Amino acid sequence: MTNTKIVSPKQDILYMVILSAVVLTMPIWLQPFGAAYPDLMQKFMIFGIFAIGYNILFGLTGYLSFGHAAFLGVGSYTAVWSFKLLSMNVIPALIFGTVLSGLFALAIGFVSLRRSGIYFSILTLAFAQMSYNLAYSVLTPITNGETGLQLTQGDARILDRAAGIQADASLPTPNLFGIEGIGYSGFYICAALMLISFFIYLRIFRSPFGLKLRAIKSNQSRMGYTGYNTRPYLMTAFVISGMYAGLAGSLLAVTDPLAGAERMQWTASGEIVLITILGGVGTLIGPLLGAGVIKYFENILSAFNDTVLVNAFSFLPDWLANGVASVLGLFVGDGWHLTLGLVFMLIVIFLPGGIMEGINRLWRLVSNRSSSSAEDKEKEQPSTKEA
Amino acid sequence: MDAIFLQILNGLDKGGAYALIALGLTLVFGTLGVVNFAHGAIFMMGAFCAVTLEKILTLSLRVKDESVTFFDAYKETPYLEVWFGDTGTAIIDWSVPLSIILAIPVMLLIGIVMERSLIRYFYKRPHADQILVTFGLAIVMQELIKAFFGANPIPQGAPDIVAGSAAIGAVFGLGEAVVYPWWRLIYLAFSLVTIGLVFSFLHFTTYGMVVRAGMADRETVELLGINIERRFTIVFGMAAVVAGLAGVMYTPVLPPDYHLGMDFLVLSFVVVVVGGMGSLPGAVLAGFLLGILQSFSSMTEVKDIFPGIDQVIIYLVAVVILLTRPRGLMGRRGVMES
């Protein structure tokens, strides 16, 4: 189902260059869409990382994990702790967040990957719910329970203090050697990390390892008959995707140094499944598109409220405007999840390959039509000659 | 001793809810082979049937309160009380049990419409697709409920006559101090009766026999000239009714809100998997077992030894069982094995 045709390394480099150009110029070309502010673009990048990581597991091996939010949460908590204890520099936070999520994924994967299919989904779901419940209750000293883990003035920040950086009256913000983790500079930090992650992900897709993962998806038992032990490959894929989630989680903490347990709830795991499916499972660029589309519409639609709607339809007669506004009001603002659910259902029903399949179908439609019309002309020409 | 007794009861009625939901899930899975993530949402719809009926019954007439003279005050009297006096009050008081009458046709309809319009196109699709589409459906259902009923839990009262606690200790010779809410006892009895009804329907009626035959070997039953698809649709509706009734009866125990379904769904899936995918007795057994385990682990004595155990016990048990008994407690060979 995926593009198994051989792609030359040159094409990949071209691919990366185009993607980098598109991503890095986002502040410009997103302007007309009203999405060019750094906060939202950072979300695009972060959930892009999360989604491509998830795609390594779900897209390549077909293992549907319903507990990936746990890794996101672990990444966030670790990053905030690194800010508190070590330094406000993002590098240790990202490294610790990624590594610790990787270890966590190793532990969970070791157990969960003993089963497959729906049992695997339930096991990952069970582990994620366990982490979520524990984060809310017993682990309160580490996670600060419902309030969420936050920075305070009195944090140790050993490295910062050793380097002679004194905290002033306001709370320090995460930075990369002085480059702020928020605003446009923050966006470029996220974008750079996203591009690096994407490059690794691209290499995994093209590697023999990626091919083996795909083989597991298409037929695991046959893979076993050919002499491969599939477990180590699955394990590696699981840990890598856990690390991607951890990286995304730590980046979330960089943009806003506050980690709450709700990031680990299973609805959050559901969201990443949604993003990946919407974009296109197992496709290279699909998950990124999915992350962008979902976060964009979340932002746009949830900003609407009833007064905005009534104003938008003020050209209609009053009674009609109110009626239309109240019906549409169901789908925007607080109700935007309703739209999300509906769109998601439609995608799964009619377009299981997500946006990417939609684009492919359109492309085929267009190219077929033009080529078939060309053929028709060729067929017609001799007949006219004969006549 | 008293505490243990009470915890067992607690676990049994929580387990009753799990067992009822898990029963429906297993029934749907066993007949149609569909993994239904929207089943929790059906449970929640049932609970909101009770809310709706209560809202209808308490539609009120606003009349001026004559006893207040300084300013205009209004008091609301439900129409039922205006029309029928004390009988009306009694009807309102009994709104939760009465909702059962409303919930049965409504849930049957919801179930059948759901199956005919959506689920049947997913028989042949992979389980992952089924999970995803029903997950989307669950989101849609809960958001609709949220749009109409708001995000806050809506408390529902049990009828006055059973609102108090039963002096259950005296019956079992444990002393007067041991009391237990009536409604929870009723819930337990209700879940046992419902489970009994479902099982006797499947085992002692011809219809049920055909359904069981269809679960075992669909193709042969079809070759015998029986329209098994229609029966399975009815079974889906039945599963919806069971979950819906479980929801209706649960409202006095836990005020329903829109994410009630999701909360129960995760747990009941764990229950189904622990019981063994496709095994009805397994689902019931696992439901009660996990309910009891959960209520024991929330005792302070246990929590002192293992802090936080009450939050994770169900998942922990699920993990252990899935790893040691891959088919669950009573799972059959060859069902959902990869």
Image (cartoon, coloured by chain):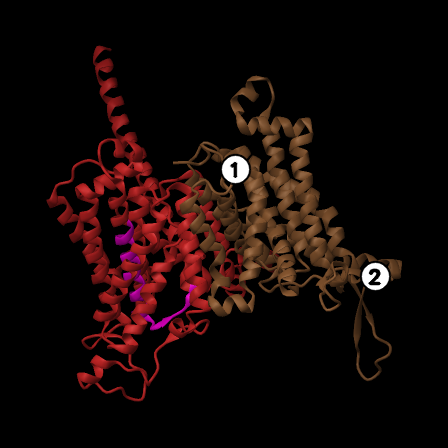
Chain colours: A red, B brown
Q: Residue at x 74, y 66 (%)?
A: B175
Compute the Cα span from label 1 to label 2: 45 Å
Height in image: B281 above or below B180?
above
As drawn, the residue found furthest toward the top would be A386
Instruction: List x then y, in percent, for residue A134.
Output: 44, 65
The residue where tag 1 is placed is: B278
The three-letter amino acid code for the residue at tag 1 is Gly
Instruction: Please give left or right for residue B151 compared with residue A192 in the image.
Output: right
- Which quarter shows the N terminus of chain B? bottom right
Helix or strand or loop: what does disc 1 sit on?
loop
Instruction: Please give left or right for residue A75 compared with residue B47 in the image.
Output: left
| Depth check, front residue: B65 or B252 | B252
Q: Residue at x 59, y 32 (%)?
A: B232
Q: Is residue A57 magenta?
A: no
The three-letter amino acid code for the residue at tag 2 is Thr
Residue A266: name its quadrant: bottom left
- Check residue A186 in the rendering and tell me which mark sits there, or answer none: none
The residue where tag 2 is placed is: B89
Helix or strand or loop: what does disc 2 sit on?
helix
Q: Residue at x 19, y 35 (%)?
A: A5
Is there any visible trace of residue A2 in the rendered image? no
- Which quarter shows the C terminus of chain B? top left
Q: If you read the primary sequence from the N terminus, does the residue marked by circle 1 or circle 2 appear first? A: 2
As drawn, the residue found furthest toward the bottom would be A169
As drawn, the residue found furthest toward the left would be A10
| Depth check, front residue: A235 or A350 | A235
Height in image: B124 above or below B281?
above
Please report the bounds of the magenta region as a residue range: A238-262
Instruction: List x then y, in percent, for residue B65.
Output: 83, 75
Is there any visible trace of residue A237 in the rendered image? yes
